Image (cartoon, rainbow, N blue to C red):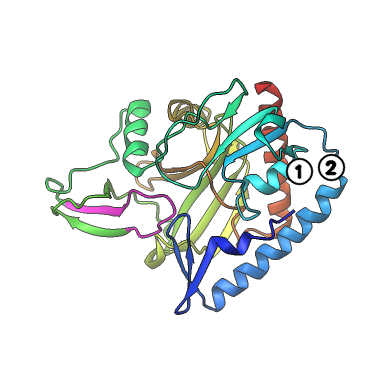
Amino acid sequence: MMNSAWWRDFQFEDGVVHVRKTGARVPVEPGVIAETLSWLAFYARIEVERLGVHRDGPRVWFAPDRPRPWYLIWPVAQLAGLRFADHPDQADLRFYFEDITASTAPQANGTPLINGQCLDTSKSCVAEIFKRVTGRTLAVNPAQWNGPMVVKSERNGAHDGRVLTGPQVAEPGIAYQRLIDNCAGDGYVEDLRCPTVGGQVEVVYLKRRPLDRRFANHNTEVRMLNPDEAFSPSERAIISDFCKMMKLDWGGLDVLRDRQTQDLWIVDANKTDMGPPIALPLADKLISTRKLARALRTLADTRL
């Protein structure tokens, strides 16, 4: 159930909700209120559906944080039949869960561990791993780059990206990347959000929003795709190799397809992603959560 102290995760000040853990700022406006109501409808359905789930899965200890219901792992774990352990000594399996970009390795105690070796999901690390897997360079040197480039925080979840023209003086804590042309041709950009379990893409969320809101966290439309619709076998292998090198057992990847070259680019990785996306229809939210639940249950069982 939702922890009664969930509200302590937030601070409200001057019309803005501040997320204490991540530092994210969310202005309170009509669109945000509508999205909150949409999320509550999904949460209510999960609460009902999980009552019919046979909870015979491994006992999982999430640490140092227990995921709140708005993190994707929460509804997925509920439908997977996993049990949340109340103490590490009761756990069959540990899940390293902390909504920060860079962390230190959790102490080993002999209990199988998920995501325990995925310690850096910064934009620079993502770009470096992507280059090792594909040989293609996402990161750019802003002082030597002539042309448009994406400038954004190294931190996950900041949604502060912008397009600047190089050359520029590099700033600390900022990642500089080549601009991927992910425009669909109708004035919208398209992102492919890929939840992965055990390095495999289980479902794809096609997110669309206007070009002038390229880096926004609010989507005009989200559609669910089968991974085979979105990616070729070789592209799925790239994603799998990327997850393996990132040591990402569970997480979400942001993938862009260049309109001109059709090349695939992994531009972000998040091991504590939220979801499913608010703009996804409720029926598809439930379908995708069930798919991820089956994959997570398999991963958990095989780790024992």
Residue at x 65%, y 33% (from the top left corner): 88
The residue that appears at 74% across and 56% down in the rendered structure is 283
Is 169 situated above or below 130? below
Q: Is residue 175 above or below residue 277?
A: above
Q: Position of residue 67 (x, y in %)?
A: 61, 48
Q: Amino acid at mark 2?
A: Val
Q: Is residue 84 above or below residue 181?
A: above
Residue placed most toward the observer, 245 or 262: 245
N-terminal-most mark, 2 or 1: 2
| Amino acid type for the residue under numbered disc 1 | Leu
Q: CA distance from mark 2 to mark 1?
A: 6 Å
Locate residue 53, reporting x and y percent. 84, 42
Q: Which residues are magenta?
A: 147-161
Residue 79 - label: 1
Classify mark 1: residues with Cα within 10 Å, few (<14), some (14-19) or many (20+).
many
* Rendered image quadrant of residue 120: top left
Magenta includes 84? no
Quarter holding the C terminus? top right
Q: Is residue 72 above or below residue 251?
A: below
- Badge 2 local density, few (<14 within 10 Å), some, or many (20+)? few
> Tag 2, which secondary structure?
loop
Residue 53: which numbered mark, if any?
2
Give the label on residue 50, or none. Answer: none
Tell me whether the residue at label 2 lies in contact with that at label 1, contact meaning CB atoms closer than 8 angstroms.
yes
Question: Is residue 157 highlighted in magenta?
Answer: yes
The reply, left or right, for residue 235 in relation to residue 172 is right
Q: Helix or strand or loop: what does disc 1 sit on?
A: helix
